[in-house]
Amino acid sequence: MDVGCGNPKVKFSDLLMEFFPNVKQIIPVDKKSALIDYVKCSVNHPKICYESADIEDWSTLQKWEGKISKVVSSHCFHQLKDQKIAFQNIFRMLKPGGEVAVLLCLKSGYVAWHCDMVNNSEWNRYYNGNSPEIPLTQFSNKEASEYENFLKEIGFSIIECKKDRIGVPFESTEIWKNAIFNLALSSFAIPENSKERFKEDICKTFINHNAMLADKPCTISYFLTVLLRKPVI
């Protein structure tokens, strides 16, 4: 099962089929039913079965209780309101000996500076509200040990639970300035005569929450890799 399969252009299920051709079935799930309906119209692989389900809502998952051998999820769990409930539901769906691989973003290098600009008294009057809801998990940047504690409480055997700091540098300062400026303009309607000053403030705020690496601006994010197994009793 692929939890939070998301954008149909990112064909993770196809990759799974390529690496695990003998798998009985792959079940990509997402709570966005319209997305699932769209994907179903274009996918005809007999082993890939797209389903609409919410990993935080057991009523949408109970038909798989004790039937799933592997669960994977990438860049989904940071959007959840209750990650513990999601892991509990995965535990219930797994067969004894079933395994889990989850990659989630603990803190994005893009979130904090954007929030600072929204709350800036000079610029918030121009904020148009055009930005995705930011999960509360993005403000806590939890340690791996916090996850280990509740995962053990659920009943998982932990193979790996590792936090990594990832830095992604821009090719040049000019590319960086233009990239974050254009990104910010999707959320702010800035008057023409204020755009240069706005751009300067964005750059300063971005660096406050990220870093310079070899004289290049670098986005700093934190990710958690979780590998788990449901014990065989």
Image (cartoon, grey):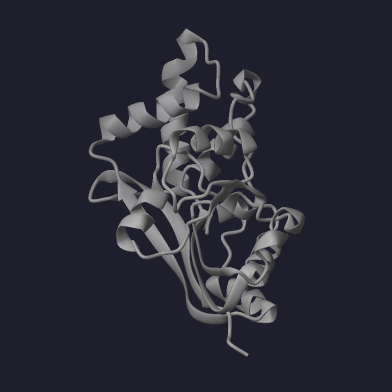
List x then y, in percent, for residue 139: 61, 52
List x then y, in percent, for residue 85: 71, 63
List x then y, in percent, for residue 161: 49, 74
Vertical side of 93 occupied by 78: above or below:
above
Vertical side of 37 occupied by 102: above or below:
below
The tally of labels here is: 0
- In front: 219, or 94? 94
* Left or right placement of residue 203 versus residue 41 in this view: left
Q: Tell me the residue at 57%/50% (across/down).
A: 29
* Left or right placement of residue 224 versus residue 146 in this view: left
Look at the image and tell me in which quarter the C terminus lies.
bottom right
Q: Tell me the residue at 76%/55% (across/down).
A: 59
Q: Tell me the residue at 41%/31% (across/down).
A: 180
List x then y, in percent, for residue 25: 47, 59
Residue ranking furthest to the bottom? 233
- In front: 58, or 165? 58
- In front: 169, or 36? 36
* Left or right placement of residue 129 versus residue 76 in this view: right
- In front: 150, or 62? 62
Q: Quadrant of residue 189?
A: top right
Vertical side of 6 occupied by 21: above or below:
below
Residue ranking furthest to the right? 59
* Left or right placement of residue 198 versus residue 85 in this view: left
Residue ranking furthest to the front? 46
Q: Tell me the residue at 46%/9% (across/down).
A: 193
